[in-house]
Image: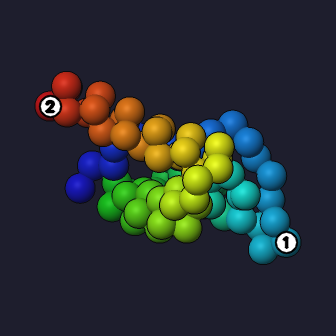
Amino acid sequence: MEPVTKKPCIDICKFNKKSICKACGRTKQEKKEWKQLSPDEKQAIWTRILESHGSGKGKQPKALRELYERAKRKKRKKG
């Protein structure tokens, strides 16, 4: 499965004590290794972070969901 976007970064990199980005939900390790991950691994991360960090009503969850939806629309136009 091809992921809908290259990365879920919304340009707010702040990590909690568990080394998880407060904005996008990826770990420092996932951010570091993102380019080397398979499409299935990337999509699995997207699925997880949309549930954990994209489900609220604030600015950051909304930005994450919008990024994902924009990428999906763009991919459909190409495909």
Q: How many marks?
A: 2
Please say whether residue 41 is visible from this viewpoint: no
Q: Could you give the CA–CA distance between mark 1 and mark 2, rounded to whole angstroms?
A: 40 Å
Residue bearing mark 1: 17
Q: Are marks 1 and 2 in contact (CB under 8 Å)?
A: no
Q: Left or right: where does residue 40 sit relative to residue 63?
A: left
Q: Residue at x 37, y 35 (%)?
A: 71
Q: Is residue 79 above or below residue 30?
A: above
Query: In which quadrant will I find the C terminus?
Result: top left
Residue 51: mark: none
Residue extending furthest toward the right: 17
Q: Secondary structure at mark 1?
A: loop
Q: Quadrant of residue 18?
A: bottom right
What residue sits 38% from the left and 33% below the top? Answer: 70
Q: Position of residue 56 (x, y in %)?
A: 57, 59
Q: Which mark is residue 79?
A: 2
| Mark 2 burial class by Cα count in 10 Å: few <14, some 14-19, many 20+ | few
Secondary element under disc 2, as helix, strand or loop, is loop
Label 1 vs 2, first from the N-terminus: 1
Q: Is residue 32 left or right of residue 79?
A: right
